[in-house]
Structures are given as structure tokens and as C-alpha cells.
Amino acid sequence: MQINKRSLAIGVGAGVVGTVVLAVVLAAIFGLPLHLFFSPTGTGAAAGLAADDVEHEVLAEDLDVPWEVVVLEEDRYLVTERTGDLLLIEDGEKHVLESFDELEEQFLGEGGLLGIATHPNFEENQYLYVHQTVDRESVENTVRRFEVDFDNRELTNEETIIDGIPSDRIHNGGRIAFGPDDYLYVTTGDSANATLAQDRDSLAGKILRLNDDGSIPESNPFGNAVYSYGHRNPQGITWDDQGDLWATEHGSDARDELNQVEMGQNYGWPTITGSETDPAMESPVFHSSQYETWAPAGTAYADGSIFFAGLRGERLYEATIDGGKVTSFVAHLSGDFGRLRAVTLGPDEEFLYLTTSNTDGRGEEGSDDDKLVRVPVEAFR
């Protein structure tokens, strides 16, 4: 039987339109929010792979709100637990390298022990950078540098890289990473004060760039640590194979964002969101709609795609990019592991490492949660 592709396309299109019209009518009749009639996979997201389709491996269980993972080598990982413990996981065994207890539980919220990053010359200097919310004269976010003593399983020689980053119970950013230029990048949230995102003298609502000792690079655009501004709550950064910086960001009214970030640019919050435009500001390359949410977190680039974790979305999202544009968007592992927080590409570039976030009070805690999971990149090809 020969299929008339044009007729089929018209029929499918009419079916989609009919479904949307029916959803609108039912929502109006029963007084239900329209987003309940649509899948929260993100704008234009196609259904991807399920956990049963991927030869994944659970590397650690019973973690307490894990936030970041650094892959040292196969079967050897550093993991932060937001509640304060820095773990060394070796051959499936968990060891506490350091317990950070500088913030009382009632102030924790979305803060706590968040991102970590190893120095580009980690094998020689053993420098580990730690982002943490602390309670000093006031609650603030800091980045400090330590040396890792693996023999004694402890951190030594603490140095402050940057402090005084505004903090609140929500919107603390927290991701840190060294870029291909060997500068240290730090994401900061607006600390629940949207106006700070537009203030270039404030460290809130920004992506910061620093030398490895905390000093300010001479090429920074505003003479301070600020690299870009107008951010609401960026929690993921990565670089593509052209060296371009990408960031995921928690948006307002579910308009979560994927931004290509350039030095000195203004990314709009709170003046513009989603597809809104302003000639002095940058709109996102891609965003979710008002009826969908990703709540994006950790982000990694692999083989032409940006993979990022969805917290409320409970998916691993894959945005294929070409020429600075998203050419396809797929949602993997739909609900298989619950909330996902970290996504890290291993040094061999063969595996993605994910942490779940079901013990954070916002998810449905499952058996042996939370987990560190490894999935092969080739599974998505």
C-alpha cells in the first residue's frame, strides 16, 4: 500500500490541533489548569530512552541529598551531600573526607555544600574548590580551596577564593567549574532578590570568572568577578567543542532556560523571560514554556549534545546543538530515577554520571535513595 505523505501530514497536524482544542475546552469546563493536559517534558521534547533501554550502573546508594560529583578515575569519585559531607567513594565504599557544619539546618533551604571542582593540574597540586553556604556575620555563599590528602582522607590548607556572595533559602546557584581557558567559573543565584541580578556591583544573579587563586582576571568586563549578569538561578555550566560556554537556568513561571553565555552580556532577569526580547539583553537559545518545567541543574557536553538534569522534570534532557542553535530536544529516563541533580562527563568521555535528588524534601524518596548512577554516552547514539 502506498502512503500519501502529504495527506498523512495534514491528518496528523489536524489531530494535534484537535487535541489542543479539546484540552482547552475541557480545561475551561472543569476549571483545570491547562498544563495538566500536556506532558512536562519541555518545549518540543521528544520521548527518549528509558532506564530499561540503557545499560546503566548504580555506583552508590543511600546518599543524603547529593549535589555534585567529580570523577577522579574509574570507581573513584568525590560527591558532595548538600547537608554537609564531602564523600570519597572508592570501589563502592563511602568515606567522609570532610564534614562541613557551618550552616544550621533551619537556614539550609537550597543552600549548603554544593559544587566542587578540581584544579586543571589536580594530579600535581591536589587543589579542590568547594562552594558552600556558611553562617558568619550573616548567611552567605563562599568558594574555598583545599588540598586533598588522600592518604589520611582529609582536606588541608584552606584558602578563601571568594566570599560575600549573597545567599537566601532559595536561588543560591552553586555550580563551579574550570573552563578550557583555565579560569574558574562560579554560578550564583539572585538570592531571592531579583533586582540584584541587574546590579553589576553585586555578586548575586551572575556567572563569575576568577583566576585559580581568586584574583580577578584582567580581561573581565567590569573590573570585578562578574563575567555575565541578569541570571535568576543558574545551576549548570558546560563548554562545547568550540569552547563556547552554555548554562542552564531556573526560570520564572516555568520558563527555564538554556543560554549560550558570552562575556559581559546581560541575560535579562528580571526584565525579560522566555522568548521576550530587549535590544540590550540576550534571550535564551532555548526555553521551556509556561505550562512545562525542567528545573534544570547539572549540565555536561558530550558528542554534539548538551545533557542536563531535570529536578521537577525528572528527566535527563538532551539538546543537540549546531551553530549555536538547538536542532533537536529529547527527554530521557522519564521518571525512572526521580529528580536528577548532577550530570558529569567522565574524563574518558565515555560515561555520564548522574546523581538523584529525591531526599531533598521535594521528591518522592524511593528504595536506597539517593543514588550515583553511570550511563554510557553511546547509549544515546
Image (tube, rainbow, N blue to C red):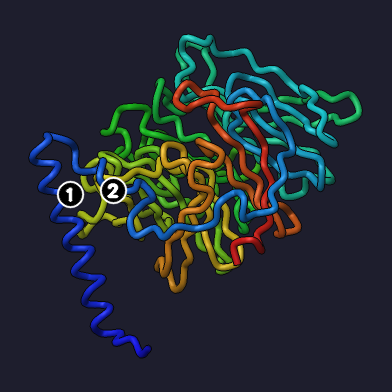
Foreground pick, 300 / 289: 289
Q: Residue at x 52, y 11 (%)?
A: 105
Disc 2 element: loop
Badge 2 is on which residue?
A: 38
Q: Quadrant of residue 169?
A: top left
10 Å crowding of disc 2: few (<14), some (14-19), many (20+): few
Disc 1 element: helix
Question: Which one is earlier in the sequence, the residue at label 1 or at label 2?
Answer: 1
Q: In the picture provided, is 16 more to the left or to the right than 347?
A: left
Look at label 2 and name its amino acid. Phe
Q: In the picture provided, is 191 more to the left or to the right than 281?
A: right
Residue 329 horizontal/vertical position (percent):
43, 61
Q: Quadrant of residue 92?
A: top right
Badge 1 is on which residue?
A: 23
Q: In the picture provided, is 145 more to the left or to the right than 193?
A: right
Q: Residue furthest bottom?
A: 2
